Image (cartoon, rainbow, N blue to C red):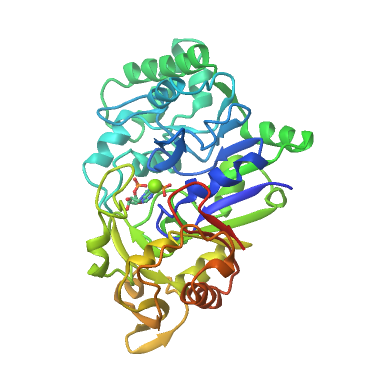
Amino acid sequence: MGNLAVIGMDWGDEGKGKIIDLLMPRFDIVARYSGGANAGHTVSNGGKDYSLHSLPSGVFEESKRLLIGNGFLLALSAYGDKDGLLQEIERMNRVVSLHGRLYVADGAHVILPHHIEADSQGSGVGSTKRGIGPSAEAKANRTGVRVGDLIGIRDHDDYLALRERILRRYDVKDVLKTLYEQRAFLEKLIDGFGVKIVNASKFLNAAFREGSNVLFEGSQGTMLDIDHGTYPTVTSTNSTAGGIYTGLGIPPKQVDQVIGVAKATESRVGDGPFPTEDSYFNVYREGWNEFGATTRRPRRLGWRDGAQLKYAARLNGVDYIALTCLDRLGDVPDRLKICVGYKIDGRETDEWPTGFRDQTVAKPIYRDLDGWHGQDISSARDFNDLPKAAQNYVRELEKEADCYIGMISVGKERGDIIQV
Ligand code: IMO
Ligand code: MG
């Protein structure tokens, strides 16, 4: 036992939710460490799917404590048609009680209306318009407002000081009104919904000492990480393993294991390089429900990239890969492909290129593999139950990724999984 991180290896939407759901019974606390409501994590309960944006997965298990870390960019309440934490809790409270088990870090930055407005004017990268980029910018240019700042307000001068901080950089109206509102939202979370404001580092270190096991829930994916992704078409936080330590205030030695989640065919929503993108898959988009969970935009689809997987495995120190949606490849009548490297300006490499220009021009080098068209693999529970071609596909991918594949999702249902 110990603490485990579940991290996306692609551009988000790898099926992290399903893997987290499966592992949940072993853990006492689920912690989100980066991103914000740009995430869309699908959790099933009683045959119904729920899309969570701010709440950690684990909402349905009343014994679990949930933590929103300081690395999280938090929208307290709705703005326009975008729900915030308050609305998400109200919605979930109809199904399961969250009272007293949701903890929010005092260091989390609050997404303010002017951040969402700035984001909806176009980020140039096709963002989710949740204010993520502008609030991360405010965090970095030191005009951000944290949960702890709002809690710490004692008198009018404290409001004025926060207003000063914002106006130093931004020409926005009604700042005081915004601050009163945000403070009221926070009071409602605390008094109305039993949310507790904590120092994430202190909270988790106490939990470790008691022997609690923590699941670190990644959002987005490695290729959207602000440092290691396809910059500038990335999100604004560190979605890779490194984000756990700063996003929660815990030391590296507390992460005992890392599972990387990767999809058997890849997807990307929003702009940016995607070497293996192939319109070949467009006919499957409806059937595979490849639309953004947060924005409903059609996802771009492509072949599995083994070289990119190797990059993501190395970056996160992935112990093993959970490969999702392997069943979908049974829909494909032709031979399958995995990308094993790239041709860039006539030069061949099996390393993921780290510059935007090279990522944009990289032509994938594919290895063709036999498929298993028409065979339903959803009842396979052992690796040897898989058709030989599917076994071979997994083995080839492992070789390219230089990482073990320890879990394979073979269907939609919760139990449709092989633990290798
Ligand atoms: P989960 O956790 C897929 C993408 C956006 C855009 C870029 C920047 O559900 O896998 P942002 O709003 O973060 O400034 O947008 O990142 N993006 C995601 N794509 N899944 C996600 O989260 C994403 N979160 C952000 O589409 O291209
Ligand atoms: Mg998603």
> Is 281 situated left or right of 369 in this image?
left
Placement of 404 over or under 346, stated as above or below: above
Q: How many marks?
A: 0
Quadrant location of residue 354? bottom left
Nearer the observer, 192 or 394: 394
Nearer the observer, 134 or 376: 376
Quadrant location of residue 80? top left
Residue 108 at x, y = what percent?
51, 33
Residue 35 at x, y = what percent?
45, 44
Residue 188 at x, y = what percent?
45, 14
Q: Which residue is drawn at 50% across and 44% down?
A: 34
Quadrant location of residue 135? top left
Placement of 318 over or under 64, stated as above or below: below
Q: Residue at x 43, y 42 (%)?
A: 41
Placement of 310 over or under 172, stated as above or below: below
> Is 127 situated left or right of 251 in this image?
left
